[in-house]
Amino acid sequence: MINLQPYENPMYFIYLFVALLPIIIAMLYGKKLHWYQTIISFVFLVLAFGGVKWHEGIALIAYIIFEMVLIGAYFYYRQKVNQTWVFCSAVVLAIIPLIIVKVTPAVYGHPSLIGFLGISYLTFKAVQMIMEIRDGAIKEFDPWLTLQFLLFFPTISSGPIDRYRRFKGDYERKPDPQKYLQLLDKGVWYIFLGFLYKFVLAYIFGTLLLPNVGKMALTYGGISWWLVAYMYVYSMDLFFDFAGYSLFAVGISYLMGIETPMNFNRPFCAWNIKEFWNRWHMTLSFWFRDYIYMRLVFFIMKKKLIKNRITIANVGYLTLFLIMGFWHGLTWYYIVYGLYHAVAIILCDVWLRYKKKHRSKIPSNRFTKLLAIFITFNVVCFSFLIFSGFLDTLFFHNIATLK
Amino acid sequence: MKMSKKLFLIFGPIIAAVILLLTLFFIPVSIQNISEGTIQRAALSQSPKVFRGMAVKKAAFSKNYVPFFGSSELSRMDSLHPAVLAQKYHRNYRPFLLGAPGTQSLVHYWGMKGIDDKLEGKKAVFIVSPQWFVKGGIAPVVFNYYYPKPEIVKWLLHAKNNRMNRYAAQRLLELSADHSSVESKGIARIAAGHPLSSFERTYLTLKSNALDREDQLFSTVSLNNRVQTISRNERFLPKAYNLKQLDKVAYTLGKEHTTNNQFKVDNRFWDKRLKHNYKKLAGKQKNYNYTDSVEFSDFQLVLNQFADKNMNALFIIPPVNERWSEYTGLSMPMLRNFVKKIKYQLNSQGFNNVVDLTDDGNKAYFMQDTIHLGWRGWLAADKYINPFLTKKQPKVSYKINNYFYSKKWQQSQSFTN
Amino acid sequence: MKEKVIGILEDLTGSQEIADNLDINLYDEGLLDSMATVQLLLELQSQCGVDVPVSEFERSEWDTPNKIIAKVESM
């Protein structure tokens, strides 16, 4: 059987477009083909998780059954009682499969059997639902819609991470042809911008430049100008690859009438690190902000565990970014990457407070703004160098000098 | 705005782009004329795009370019490099360099498949590196890096059911990373001795057209420019071709460039490739064996192709730097055995232009580094290349023997004439 | 109620200009961040008696003083 990975090659887009054509035409007539959309989703899921990846397909099915039962059970429980320990257990249960998948390679050196492409993103969605059920924001449990939300195929492998209530609104709304035309316009534009990002720019940076620059950096060993070049080339590749992929996911969602949120908003134009996280992998950082940082801060303040506002904020940042680091994987460089960003944000806050106090003495003009963007850009690129794991190869496993 | 107009604004540009692209890729007429300058650059570029492309090679071999098959030694472009000598002394031929690190018999075989008609009766120079003949032959990653798709598709469309094609298809299946495409299905049929299905034939014909177009449009874009390197190296050479003077030049250049190490290898090669790790390599090659390898049958493909096209080839077997082989423990008797075996394969089938330089590994400045010809080595090779290419050669007659495709031959240790 | 909310916002942002411009975007201007948002929710709970869970807090619906006042009054 054939296996077709999402957005892998131009053929995928041709198949996808043909499959989506009936949906597009129906929407232009103000109708929604929910049943047809379900069949298409099923077919593309089978293509992505079938064939040589059938074991991932089995893992996905088992995972979905588990999370659905958990969400449903918690919902019915929550309608009657609201105890904190039950809520905490539900969250822990929801993330246990992800934890197993992340820990297995670090401990046993091989990928976990229950892993599949996109497990992280499904977990984010499931945890989000449990938290909103607890808050009473999700007022009814609709298994069919929950399934559609979790398994929405354009975003299944790597996001963007949508929100249940937002998705529900888009899914159920009767389409307005004029508004849909605008969506279609934007969707097509995003997909083609994605082609430029992923198949041209990411190809240039990632396939043509990166291996050569990497080889040179390894040959010279240690700190060299080639390492600096590697840092920038890798950062560009990371951005264009991921942003390109996200544009595809958003564009395809738009064609289906679902306004999946954007993931990137010119991140390298950010003027400080806080602003950067409002522009880089936005759906992930907003998820962490809303479901970890704000809740933790809320809890600490309400229980008055810590008095000092600044300390609370810093504890929040450290927790958030450490969790993000661990989520990327259990290696020293992902965790250092998390810590690095936590420290950068804490220092950024120190600077912002200082600036607020001495507003009159600190110049603010076009030059200082450009300088801020330049500094932020370099701080970020350095963090990506850590993230890339290249330093690990360079310092500890460099065959060119160790052999 | 009316809906149809808006839709046209959204999809119009895409439809226009698709139509343009399809026309560009599928019109069966050639669009490009390849200039002399482009050929010259391509001949020296050693670029995988050129190896797997066909347009430039066809243009070059209709002129006075001669294929020089080899591997990494071809990039040792000092003043005595065949390309420099041919240009400096205005010879009637120019080398077209077909070789780069890792290109072995299979890459060369496929490199010839798409340009069959331009090779009929041509001369060629073929540098056979003993280092190719390790047990498994070419590494799959390397082969896939050079994967000559346009040639393979073209070959599929014309492949008759014979031993050569079945063996070639079998090797492709073993090495290729791709198992689901129409091409690989076709390859599997050829390997099993069956003809292509009519769907495969139609699909591959269209594909071949698209690949041709891609090749014509892109294979000569952004090539390494070595033309300057060649001209720069010319200035060290005497005005007239004089072996004695040239040897002096080669000696001097060699001496100048090998001052920082005990193996007499090029200074830059030493700094970049050996200085850090040579200590770990002492005695490491004691058990190397070049006499038991699938490469012998891959090499047979090349010979078969030469014979089919009545080509006349000069085979050169380069030596190993003796200081280096003594240090790494590479066995000289084993190397001599290899030469015996390869010579048997060549001579018994009628390939008689074989130059064996294996015993010259101890001559000063013969090698540019550990296993690659340089200064005086290139000059020694030129003593054979020059007359072979500039003088008329007797007509060739070959007797191809399919035994050389067998496992038995690959492993055989008895080969006497 | 309006005065109370403005009072809370002025405390949190340390800016006396809130009352002058009730349509100022608190996030874009850097007056509020996630931390201050949580404080805002807690203050609304203790001073105004409105209970807003974090889930109900959607940034785009709470980004100006006027929007916040309207939200609080509707609860």
Image: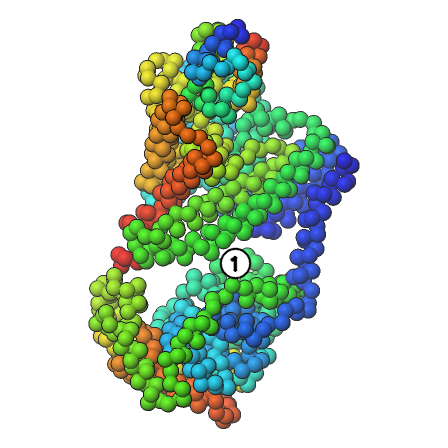
Indicate the chain on which mark 1 is placed: B
Quadrant of the image occupied by residue B149: bottom right
At x 42%, y 70%, the residue is B100
Percent coordinates x, y for residue A317 in the rendering:
37, 27
Image quadrant where residue A180 sits: top right
Depth check: give the residue in front, B321 or A364: A364
Coordinates of residue A259 in the picture (x, y in percent):
60, 32
Name the amino acid, label 1: His
- Taking A90 as reference, is A116 above or below it? below
**Residue B254 vertical placement versus B218 (above, below):** below
Quadrant placement of the C terminus of chain A = bottom left
**Left of A144 or right of it: where is C42?**
left
Whether residue A225 is situated above or below residue B67 in the rendered picture: above
Q: Nearer the viewer, residue B136 or A333?
A: A333
Count of numbered tags: 1
Q: What secondary structure is marked by label 1?
A: loop
Q: Residue at left 57%, top 35%? A: A152
**How are the residues colored?**
rainbow
Q: Position of residue A110 (x, y in %)?
A: 37, 45
> Mark 1: few, some, or many residues within 10 Å (few <14, many ≥20)?
few
- Residue drawn at the location 45% of the way across and 35% of the way down: A369
- Residue at image location 46% in from the left, 62% down from the top: B145
Residue B190 image-quadrant placement? bottom right
The residue lying toward the viewer, choosing from B66 and B341, is B66
Which residue has dot 1 on it?
Answer: B179
| Residue B148 visible, this orientation | no
Q: Position of residue B172 (x, y in %)?
A: 49, 66
Asked if residue A311 shows in the view, the reply is yes
Residue B133 vs residue A143, the one in the foreground:
B133
